[in-house]
Image (spheres, rainbow, N blue to C red):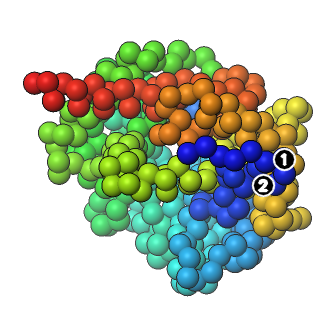
Amino acid sequence: MACPPTSDPRARYLRWISDRPRQVVLQPTTFCNLDCSYCYLPGRAVKNAMPVEVAAAVARSVTELTDASGPPVRIIWHAGEPLTLGRVRFAELLAPFESLRAEGRVQHAVQTNATLIDDRWCDLLAVHGVRVGVSVDGPRVLNARRVDRAGRAAFDRILRGIGALREYGLPFSVISVVSRESLHAPEALLDHLTALGCRSIGLNIEEYEGVNTGRAVPDLGDAVDFWARVLTWSHHRPDAPPVRELDRLGSYLRMTRDGTRPQWEDARHDPIPTVTANGDVVLLSPELADTRTSAYDDFRAGNILRQPLAAILADAHRLRYVTEFLTGLDNCRTSCDFFDFCRGSQAGNRYFEHGTFTATETAYCRSTEQALVIAAADTTRKDTTA
C-alpha cells in the first residue's frame, strides 16, 4: 500500500512510526558477566547501574502513555546482563511499576544469559510476573563463543540456570545467535533448544552490529539453505516450540490469504524507546544505546529525568537519524520487492553497516528477511511439484 506524500515532518513521522510505544527497553546496567566474542555492547565491562530515580521516571511516563483498556506496554530489561545488579537492586527497579502491573498496563520481560539464575531469582521473577528470555546458542560446540572474562565457557552455567527455571516451573523463551558454524547445523541447534523445554525460539543470524564488525556474515545462498532446513525441521516437528521468524512469516501469509493484509501494511514501526542506565533515551533500535557519534549526538533523543517519554516522542521527528530512517523507509518501499513483508526492517543495521539510515539493503535484510521468504517459496514450489 503506497503512503501518501506529505510535507509536514510530524505527519511524515506518524505515517511510518507509532506515536505510542508497544515496548520500552530499560538498561538496568551496562555490565555483563560474560564476554561473548560477537557481543555488540561497547560498555559491557563497565559497571554503570540505573538509579531507582530513572526507573521511577519511566514508570511515570508509562502512566501517561497507557490506560487500563489498552494492551500493556512491555518493559524489557536488557542491554547488559540485568541479573548482575543483584536481586535487591533489581527489585528496587521493578517496584515503581508495581501499580501499573497490577492494573495490567505493563508486562515485564528480561533477557538474560541465565548464568546467575537460582531459586531466589525465580522467586523474584515470579512475584513480579517477569517473562524470561534466555540467550543460548545451542549445544556445547555451538555455544563455544559464550565465555566469561577469563575465557571460560559459560555453557554449564547457562544450563544450570535453565534447570532452575524448569524446576521452578517458570516458562522461558530462548534467543540464539546463529553463527557461521550453526548456520550449517540448524537441526542440531533446534533439537537442542527444544530439549531445553523453552516455549519459543528466536534465531538471530549474526550481523554487523555495535562493536561486532569483525566477523563475516553469511551469503544469501547459505542463509536460504538455513531457513529451508528450519522450515523442514518445523514441518516435521509440529509439537516443537514455535520459531519466532517462521511465526512472523506465517502471520503475513495468513493475512494475505484472508484479505487482512492491509492491517500488516498499515502497521507502523514501534519507536522502541530505550532508556540507558543514566536515563538517556535512544529511539528505533536498542543497539544504538551507548554508541558514540558526534554526527548524531550519540542518538540521544532526551533524558527521562528531564523530559517524559511523551514529550521526547513528540519531538522525535526533529532528530536527524530519525528523519534519515524515514527516508530509508521511503527508499526501501520504492526499490525492494520484499518490502511488503519486511516493512523496512531494522534501523540499527543500516547505521552499523552503512553509517547512515537512508541506506536500504543490509546483511540482516538478506539473511533474515529475504532468505526466509525465498526459502519458503522454494519449499512450497518443491512440495507442489513433488
Number of the label disc, if any, that sits on residue 11: 2
Q: Residue at x 66, y 23 (%)?
A: 353
| Residue shown at the point (53%, 72%) measured from the top left | 71
Residue in the picture at 36% in, 22% down: 224
In depth, the one of 333 and 310 nearer the eye is: 333
Q: Position of residue 89 (x, y in %)?
A: 64, 66
SS type, badge 2? helix
Which residue in the structure is indicated by mark 1? 7
Q: Is residue 247 left or right of residue 275?
A: left
Tell me: residue 84, above or below residue 350: below
The residue depicted at 58 percent of the width and 32 percent of the height is: 39
Amino acid under label 1? Answer: Ser
Labels 1, 2: front one: 1
Quarter occupied by the N terminus: top right
In this rendering, position of residue 154 left or right of residue 101 = left
Residue 217: x and y in percent read 51, 19
Q: CA distance from mark 1 to mark 2?
A: 8 Å
Say above or below: 22 vs 361: below
Give the quadrant of residue 386: top left
Instruction: Report the label total.
Output: 2
Q: 10 Å neighbourhood of mark 1: few (<14), some, or many (≥20)?
A: few
Place residue 32 in its image quadrant: top right
Q: Is residue 12 visible?
A: yes
Foreground residue among 386 and 151: 386
Asked whether the viewer can see residue 47, the reply is: no
137 left or right of 215? left
Mark 2 nearby-residue class (10 Å; few <14, some 14–19, many ≥20): few
Callouts 1 and 2 close, C-beta under 8 Å: no
- Say what amino acid the circle numbered 2 marks: Ala
